[in-house]
Image: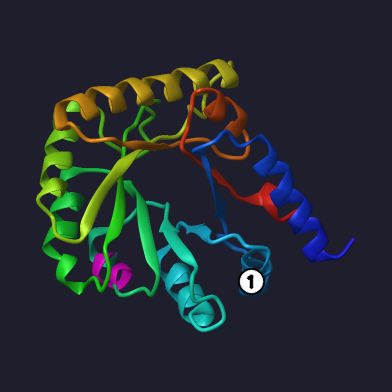
């Protein structure tokens, strides 16, 4: 089977189980620009990277051949990398906005953007120390309200990851995803604004879809 046929089958298999309204983000970190281009030629447009430098290099390499590509930043974002990120062509969304300081930095730097960018606020539902993210709804709402006053940063929704260190992975994933949905509903009510969720990776995306995730983030399984 050729690479294009393999990738096409993987894409069709995922699309076949995606509920209406849910979307696939292909995580292309460590993958080559040629691999990304195959998925682009198959009609896919949304790709996620977790390092600003790698994202920048790939975006420049594919700027001409993949003009409609949409790049999503999904990894931990350091404040000193914001201006570099904002200069990346076809930057579409940031899924990993994890605290108030970063929100302030993003808002202060938005003048460097040439187009609007969607923002997902990361909420740490697992409470694991190695994970970033808001851990209370008060600070989350404060961050959301800051974004509502931005000209180029559009509050799109919330992101989370399931618990890693657990003996009951599936139950914990479901708990984390249900919690994010509840937090989202509370924030929607406070802001009178519809929000989306970004949750679910290769090991738990089916659970995330059962909990009505709007975006699932799939990496290795889409390339091997």
Q: From the viewer's perspective, is 10 left or right of 163? A: right
Across and down, in percent, residue 31 comes to 63, 64
Q: Residue at x 78, y 65 (%)?
A: 4
Mark 1 crowd level (few <14, some 14–19, many ≥20, 10 Å Cα): some
Give the quarter of the figure containing the N terminus. Answer: bottom right
Instruction: Work out which residue is located at the far right of the displayed protein and give it.
Output: 1
Looking at the picture, tell me which residue is in the foreground, 103 or 110: 110
Is 137 rendered above or below residue 107? above
Q: In which quarter of the image is residue 117?
A: bottom left
Res. 136 in view: no
Q: Which residue is drawn at 23% across and 22% down?
A: 186
Across and down, in percent, residue 46 comes to 51, 58
Q: From the viewer's perspective, is 204 left or right of 223? A: left
Is 115 rendered above or below residue 8? below
Looking at the picture, tell me which residue is in the foreground, 5 or 21: 21
Residue identified by numbered label 1: 37
Instruction: Work out which residue is located at the far front of the displayed protein and give it.
Output: 20
Q: What stretch is highlighted in magenta?
A: 82-86
């Amino acid at each position: 089977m050729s690479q294009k046929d393999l990738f096409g089958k993987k894409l069709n298999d995922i699309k076949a189980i995606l509920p209406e309204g849910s979307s696939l983000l292909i995580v292309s970190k460590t993958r080559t620009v040629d691999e990304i281009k195959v998925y682009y030629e198959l009609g896919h447009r949304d790709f996620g990277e977790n390092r600003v430098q790698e994202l920048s290099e790939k975006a420049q390499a594919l700027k001409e051949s993949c003009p409609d590509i949409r790049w999503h930043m999904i990894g931990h974002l350091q404040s000193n990398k914001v201006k570099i990120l904002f200069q990346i062509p076809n930057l579409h969304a940031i899924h990993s906005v994890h605290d108030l300081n970063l929100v302030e930095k993003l808002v202060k730097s938005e003048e460097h953007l040439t187009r609007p960018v969607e923002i997902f606020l990361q909420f740490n539902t697992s409470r694991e120390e190695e994970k970033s993210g808001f851990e209370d709804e008060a600070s989350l709402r404060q961050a959301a309200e800051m974004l509502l006053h931005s000209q180029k940063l559009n509050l799109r929704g919330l992101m989370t990851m399931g618990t890693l260190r657990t003996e009951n992975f599936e139950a914990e994933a479901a708990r984390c995803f249900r919690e994010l949905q509840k937090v989202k509903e509370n924030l929607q009510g406070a802001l009178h604004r519809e929000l989306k969720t970004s949750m679910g990776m290769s090991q738990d995306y089916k659970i995330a879809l059962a909990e009505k995730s709007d975006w699932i983030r799939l990496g290795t399984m889409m390339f091997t």
